[in-house]
Amino acid sequence: MLGLVRVLSGRIALVLSMIIVGLAVFAAIAAPWLPIADPNAMDAMPYTPPGAEHWLGTDNYGRDVLSRIVWGARLALLVALISSAIASFLGIVLGSISGYFGGLIDTVLSRTFDVFLLIPSFFLVLLIVALFGSRIEFTMVAIALTTWPRSARIMRAQVLSLKSRVYVQAAKAAGASHARTLIRHIIPNGLAPIITDATILMGLAVLTEAGLSFLGLGDQNAVSWGRMIFDGQRELRLAPWMSIFPGVSLLLLVAAFNLLGDGLNEALNPQLRRLTTRAAQKPTCELVPTVPEPDAPILRVSNLRMAYDLGSNSIAPVDGVSFTLQRGDSLGVVGESGCGKSSLGAAILQVMAPNARMTDGDIDLAGAPILRDGCRVVHNGRDSLASLRWTKAAIIFQSAMNALNPVMKVGDQLIEAFLLHRTDANRDAAMQRVVAVFDLIGVPRARMGSYPHELSGGMRQRVMIALSLLHEPELLVADEPTTALDVLVQDQILGEIDALKKQMGLSLILISHDMGAVAETCRRVAVMYAGEIIEIAPTETIFGYARHPYTQALLAALPTVSGEKRLPKTLPGEPVNMAEPMTACRFAPRCEKAADICRTTRPPRVDVAPEHEALCHFAGLVRT
Amino acid sequence: MTLLLETRGLEKRYPLRSGMMAALRGERRSLRAVDGINLTLSPGEIVALVGESGSGKTTTGKLLTLQETPTSGEILFEGRDVTTLGHVERKAYLRRVQMIFQNPYEALDPRHRVIQSVMEPLEIHNTGTAAERRANAERMLEAVELRPVARFMDRYPADLSGGQLQRVAIARALVLNPHLVIADEPVSMLDVSVRAGVMNLMLRLSRDLGLASLYITHDLAVARTMSTRMAVMYLGMVVEEGPTEALVARAAHPYTRLLVASVPEHRAGPRRTRIKLAGEASALTSAPQGCRFAPRCPLATDICRTQIPMKLQISADHWSACHHALQVVSGHQVV
């Protein structure tokens, strides 16, 4: 029920169409008991205009139009329901078989769908009705026969995508039969678009039946809107109400079915749902530019906070993060998924998702203020970061290697990217720069003429790194740059990033879930948990003398290839729910060493040693 | 000792669509995903199958669970070839061999409650009454430490974390009391803190239930934790096989050495010196001349490019398919 309310909220068309369909259904079911006249009784005055006695008037035989519309809804809905049920059923069964078994079965069935779709449906219906008579059952079957290939094609496409899902493979690997796999796992998961389409089929069926009746091929004994319109059009001058009211009913019901289909599609299809709303950003603040100090650190972040708006609630993936990065230094940010490390990376360069907003904090990039108290800094209406992004600082994203334009040679993409920021340069200069960055990161020059799909994953990621280095940034933020790659390639690329750091004097922030990758590439390590840096220290300190129980537990949980074989140590529990407000130590529920104070009081930031801070009540105590 | 599982010359090729001209010339190319492998598993033993993506390790897992039909070769389970079984015997085999998949977020039907997913294998194999099946599934959820069971069993997959989902998948795989579990990278998508818990759980259950496992992974450190024996695959072939500790400490194939060296160590210090490794593994579409690792191998000599290396026995249970295996094992600098 709650789910229904959520689906309906903000969808006026869907609600309206449900009301209309609901009214029609009520009228159809309740027709015999409603206080209306007999639809076939000819006891009133013919051609009575709408009035107190006959709200919608009477027809040429003196029958009540309102009553006939109500009874006509009964026929319309019956045809809609039964013909779309037959069509959907046929479509689900044949579409599933076609998609699931493939091969020859699929070829034969698919061609059958195509042939049926080619037949002009109204003429097939005409033919069937002409051959077998105009009983309502034949009309329904005829409509179903011309519409089922639509459902079949949709179902086939659904099954084709669903049959490669892991849970379907898992069912088969467990020994499930084809029938079981289809009925238990594939069909239930593929039904949503069929249901959606069925409502549109219902609209179509209502229209087809009305059309048939209009042509005099409908069931002569039933009250039909189509027949009413036909009878009315001869008397259009004399009694316009005879055709207008059934016409409007028909229009409303068919429109409602179509709107219902669209609305359901939007509600049931996650791809059409707009999950993210644009978060309201804080106003920008105007700051008089000052000359940046020459020896200012490349990056200073203090008390940074950001929030994601998720519908009605929001979470804080970065919740009071402070650190300073000197020029040429490197910082690894490690933590588990959901700890906020990627959000932190995006926040530094202000390239966050649209539903993210900064709530507090300052950022200074190479001595220039770009964020103050969560507000973007502007000079003369120009964003202060715009000129610094890519030229002072660049970011490589996790899935960046898939972000290259597939129809453009990689060399041309880089040249274009170079010229975008360097309007003074010509193409030759751009070419030279691209060759230079390709050399730096180990992409063979010959690869400039390749399209992205011609490159391996490792090469594509190298191209993305080259792209980020085009404008000689001083700071590189790399968010899981090697995660999707094979181990040997990952090792190579980490080595190349390490070399770049030394060659270009690059400052580096490497965001990774992999403690090992960070250990070998960065001088310092920050460990994040639930939006906070819970420990930050030089790398050897983190790996040798970690003070925070979470850091210690993470290290103990890692398997190794060197030294004595030891079993990884289990860390109990699950990462915290960030939606909850913070009143105590966030790690306390999972911490072996937690005391009462940990569950009640926020831990202080303890200076353990120079450059070593830990967010733990017990960090200052003697090492255990 | 009798073997639980043995593959003999197991091969899987996928036909490739070739161009019209090639078709006219009668050329037929195929991708050699698995190119003649011989694996053995004793009852209760855990063997790690290690390799990069494209090495054929996942295809091997699919062949063993009959999700794919081998192009040639045999899979002997307790001495009987299972690739040619009839319907009933095939189902009986699938009851004793279970698979755990890599992606826990997709391995469970999103519309089924946890308890339904765990009961499903029992339903498929018509085991016991409905009440017995439920009790069995609940016992299994308890065994994978999803406690309290009553809180978890009626939830849907979307409500569980990755670690919890993988525990459900393990419960589902073990509920039929199989003799062999094929685990395809079961922890690679899990967070570090959760990963250790799942690995320890699998080790404990294997020991308690006397279960044999083929543990498929690309991560040498995970393979070392989980297995007692290890087979390293490269482009469809096993290139080295032996006791896990021997392979980790004294590998006799340059590829294994490189894999071991590529595992980042969890301690600070100067970066290991590394060699430039040429290129990336690309799928084989024709029979290779010589060693298939030669194009990338830092030790490759002329013989490597012309002659297919034979298995070279390093010790009783350790062999390597490398022309220079003896040099490598005696500590020749590879990395």
Image (spheres, helix red, strand yellow):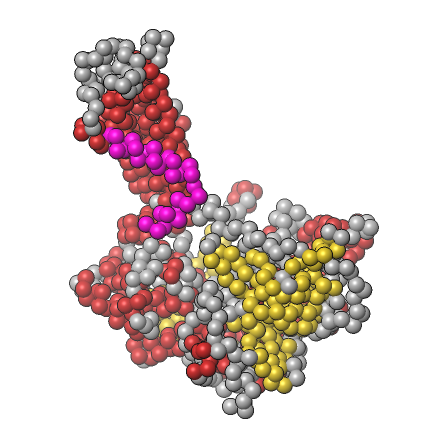
In this rendered view, identify the residue nearer to me: B143 or A610.
A610
Residue located at (39% from left, 71% from top)? B214
Q: Position of residue A382 (x, y in %)?
A: 73, 52
Left or right of B267: which side holds B242? left
Magenta span: chief secondary structure? helix
| Observer able to see residue B92 | yes
**Where B43 falls versus B120 (above or below)?**
below
Query: Is any part of residue A440 visible from this angle?
Result: no
**Total number of numbered labels?**
0
**Residue appearing at x 43%, y 82% in the figure:** A596
Q: Position of residue A182 (x, y in %)?
A: 31, 49
Q: What residue appears at the point 54 percent right and 42 percent down from the top-left corner?
A: B20
- Residue pictured at 78% horizontal, 60% vertical: A289
Instruction: Pick the residue in front: A534 or A151.
Output: A534
How far across and down, in percent of the image, does residue A81 sit?
28, 33
Quadrant location of the C terminus of chain B?
bottom right
> What span is colored magenta in the figure?
A1-28
Membership of A19 in magenta stretch: yes
Q: Using the rendered view, name the quadrant where residue A145 is placed.
A: top left
* A62 over B76 or under it: above or below: above
Quarter of the picture containing the N terminus of chain B is bottom left
Q: Quadrant of residue A222?
A: top left
Of residue B282 and residue A247, the one placed in the foreground of this image is A247
Considering only vertical position in the picture, is A570 above or below B31? below
| Residue B62 vs residue A452, the one in the foreground | A452
User: What percent of the width, then of the height, locates residue A300?
Assistant: 68, 69
Which corner quadrant of the image does residue A379 belong to?
bottom right
Residue A23: in magenta span: yes
